[in-house]
Image: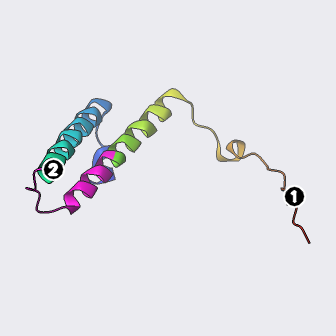
Amino acid sequence: MKTSELRAKDSAGLVKEVSELLKAHFGLRMQKATQQLTNHSQLGKTRRDIARAKTIQAEAKRAATSPAKPAAAAKKPTAAKKTGAKK
């Protein structure tokens, strides 16, 4: 599933999508264990889809709980690190 499709869903839709993907991934793992899985690339695809959906869930949760910060205020200057290079 594309990220644009996931971003269009509300939080309940994302929860439902993640649970469906987890069930599908479980089914694929069982097929693999019983030597019935023919397309092994489906395991990786569903795993990445789950991660993609959970990431969008976390982004939506983070955006809802914290106010947006301006980009200039978010960056803090860092001091240059001194490396103790031996000669």
Q: Callout 1, which amino acid?
A: Lys
- Regarding residue 7, the answer to whether it shows in the image is no
Magenta range is: 34-50
Q: Callout 2, which amino acid?
A: Ala
Res. 57 mark: none
Furthest residue toward top:
65
Neighbour tally class for label 2: few under 14, some 14-19, many 20 plus, Cα within 10 Å: few
Observer-nearest of 63 and 84: 84
User: In the visual, does 43 lie left or right of 11?
Assistant: left
**Residue located 47% across and 30% down the image:** 64
User: In the visual, does 19 lie left or right of 59?
Assistant: left
Furthest residue toward right:
87
User: In the visual, does 26 lie left or right of 62?
Assistant: left
Task: Classify mark 1: helix, strand or loop.
Answer: loop
Residue 45 position in % (x across, y down): 26, 56
User: In the visual, does 31 lie left or right of 16?
Assistant: left
Observer-side mark, 1 or 2, equals 2
**24 vs 1: above or below:** above
| Residue at mark 2 | 33
Observer-nearest of 35 and 55: 35
**Residue located 87% across and 66% down the image:** 85
| Residue at mark 1 | 82
Residue 87 position in % (x across, y down): 92, 72
**Residue located 14% across and 44% down the image:** 27
**Residue located 35% across and 47% down the image:** 51
Task: Classify mark 2: helix, strand or loop.
Answer: helix
Residue 59 position in % (x across, y down): 45, 39
Q: Is 47 contained in the magenta span?
A: yes
**9 vs 80: above or below:** above
Q: Is 37 contained in the magenta span?
A: yes
